[in-house]
Image (tube, grey):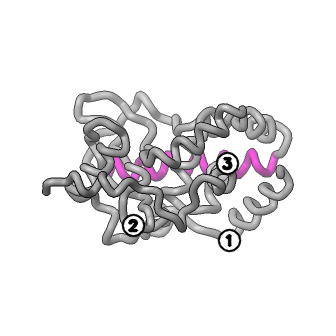
Amino acid sequence: MSTEHTSTSQKNSSAAALSTSDTGSPGGFGVTAETLAPSALDIHVLSQELGRQVRDVAEIPARCVCGNPLVAATAPRLSNGSPFPTVFYLAHPVITAAASRFEAEGKMYEMTDRIAEDPEIAQQYQAAHENYIAERERIRLQTGTEEVPEIDGISAGGMPTRVKCLHAVLGHTLSVGRGINPFGDETLDLIAEYWTPEQCACDPAWRESFEG
């Protein structure tokens, strides 16, 4: 598995998808420039997915094939003043549950070992860390948020030295596309038994309960 994933990441990193901060166009799954902005329906669906009222959502960087949000992009400082480094927050419960299965199996530790063993994948993961910070800065500027010195140099998910959270690296891949975060890409492959970007696993009640 390690060799297969590494070769895929190498191919992707040499040619592939650039993120929004690099190209000016969204690279996330299921989104276009016209569908990045969150609607009232999006906020409602996100709240249904997470089981709480969401706030400070700046973008919807990844969508289901049905149009529902998969990830919420959040300003790096919340409206209550708290710093929030995890700009790409994985929201869809089916996807989070799938990632949790592999966290329970300890996949993060296997991935972390490979960072120390494979200089090439370590370099790719370092680049993913830098991309994450660049994307967060883009959203900070877009939302008019003041600088957040408390999280300078901090990305998410343990980047760049370890893999601490599969939800974070998977949220990154869904938000910027394949070829940027090698372990987000691998996690997306791992959960294919439970969910893929080509299928809808949404609860119709999320939309049906909207009173907009």
User: Quadrant location of residue 166?
Assistant: top right
Callout 1 secondary element: helix
Residue 36 in the image: state x and y as whole percent.
34, 63
The residue carrying mark 2 is 66
The single residue placed furthest to the left in the displayed view is 212
* Callouts 1 and 3 close, C-beta under 8 Å: no
Q: Earlier in the sequence, mark 2 or mark 1?
A: 1
Q: Are marks 3 and 2 in contact (CB under 8 Å)?
A: no
Q: Is residue 25 above or below residue 59?
A: below
Q: Nearer the viewer, mark 2 or mark 1?
A: 2
The residue beneath circle 1 is: 15
Residue 122: percent from the left, percent from the top?
75, 45
Question: Which numbered marker is on residue 24?
Answer: none
Q: Which residue is mark 3?
A: 183
Q: In x, y percent, where is residue 154? A: 52, 35
Determine if residue 96 is in view. yes
Q: Of the residues shown, which amino acid type is indicated by label 3? A: Phe
Query: Quick one: 85 or 106, which is closer to the camera?
Result: 106
Q: Label 2's element?
A: loop
Quadrant in the picture for the C terminus: bottom left
Q: Quadrant of residue 49?
A: top left
Q: Which amino acid is tagged 2?
A: Cys
The residue positioned 42% from the left and 44% from the top of the image is 87
Coordinates of residue 139 in the picture (x, y in percent): 36, 51
Which one is closest to the eye, mark 1 or mark 3?
A: 3
Q: Are marks 2 and 1 in contact (CB under 8 Å)?
A: no
Q: Residue at x 22, y 52 (%)?
A: 209
User: Is-magenta flag for residue 141?
Assistant: yes
The region drawn magenta spans: 119-142
The reply to whether residue 24 is visible in this rendering is no
